[in-house]
């Protein structure tokens, strides 16, 4: 048995034993397929995009029909993360996805260095995020990715959160700060700093495919979710 099969089998046994009578929660939005685009850019924090992608990829091992793809805000190309990881990413195609997850990174750096401030100053990513909005599309963010959504006007008057060091800025720009680790306002889902990306992705897996799939992924990752999920 290969490593992937061993993980899947062991996790399935654990989930079955812990929740044989478990039912799908009322908030779960069951669907046949979920297409995820994880938006990356030069200076994006590594864990902000790697952690959600790993959760989504593992969910596929538990029966979820889910596709997770790294994308840029323009043409396909190579992105250099905050710590030098080079990522090959597909081009921007928001009509071909159900969920866009926006990474953060570099928020405390000057705007002439790669990261969120530089992207806000350029204006391109906020513009394409603003234009991407449509019925059926969910926009999500990890850490200071929320500040890119804010620059696009998407968080104004909406419950939201971000890294604790950017909370004041998000609120000053019109966001309704909500003290959950993950804040789910339907088609806008935001998370706190860095490691919150794991909790964001696990919540989205649960929301779309049910708790059993999310628990299976937790078992493989040996990760226990933290904090409160705020949702309507």
Image (cartoon, helix red, strand yellow):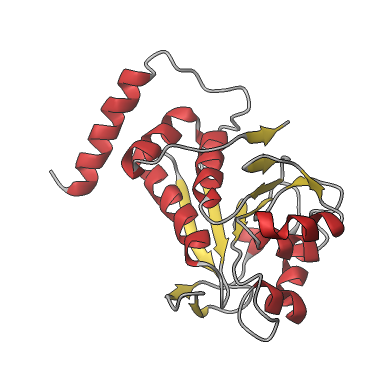
In terms of depth relative to the viewer, which is nearer, 166 or 7? 166
* Residue drawn 87% across the image and 54% down it: 174
Q: In which quarter of the image is residue 111?
A: bottom right
**Horizontal placement of 73 versus 77: left or right?**
right
> Which residue is the extreme one toward the left?
1
Q: Measured from the top left, where is residue 157 in percent x and y?
A: 87, 48
* Residue drawn 62% across the image and 50% down it: 192
* Residue 182 sits above or below residue 145 on the image: above
Q: In which quarter of the image is residue 21?
A: top left
* Residue 38 sits above or below residue 20 on the image: below
Question: Can the viewer see residue 102?
Answer: yes
Question: Can the viewer see residue 123?
Answer: no
Q: Quadrant of residue 186?
A: top right
Q: Measured from the top left, where is residue 172 in percent x and y?
A: 86, 58
* Residue drawn 12% across the image and 43% down it: 1
In terms of depth relative to the viewer, which is nearer, 107 or 5? 107
The total of numbered circles placed on residues is: 0
Q: Measured from the top left, where is residue 99 in percent x and y?
A: 61, 52
């Amino acid at each position: 048995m290969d490593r992937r099969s061993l993980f899947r089998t062991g996790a399935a046994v654990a989930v079955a034993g812990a929740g044989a009578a478990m039912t799908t929660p009322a908030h779960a939005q069951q669907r046949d397929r979920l297409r995820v685009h994880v938006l990356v850019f030069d200076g994006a924090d590594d864990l902000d995009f790697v952690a959600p992608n790993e959760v989504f990829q593992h969910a596929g091992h538990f029966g979820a029909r889910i596709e997770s793809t790294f994308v840029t805000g323009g043409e396909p190309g190579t992105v250099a993360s905050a710590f030098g990881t080079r990522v090959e990413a597909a081009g921007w195609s928001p009509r071909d996805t159900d969920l866009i997850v926006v990474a953060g990174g570099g928020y405390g750096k000057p705007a002439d260095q790669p990261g969120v401030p530089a992207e806000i100053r350029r204006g391109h990513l906020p513009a394409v995020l603003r234009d991407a909005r449509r019925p059926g599309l969910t926009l999500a963010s990890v850490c200071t990715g929320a500040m890119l959504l804010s620059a696009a006007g998407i968080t104004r008057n909406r419950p939201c959160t971000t890294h604790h060091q950017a909370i004041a800025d998000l609120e000053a720009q019109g966001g309704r700060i909500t003290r959950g680790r993950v804040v789910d306002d339907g088609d806008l889902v935001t998370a706190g700093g860095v490691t919150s990306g794991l909790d964001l992705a696990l919540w989205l897996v649960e929301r779309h495919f049910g708790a059993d799939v999310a628990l299976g992924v937790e078992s493989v990752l040996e990760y226990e979710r933290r904090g409160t999920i705020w949702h309507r």
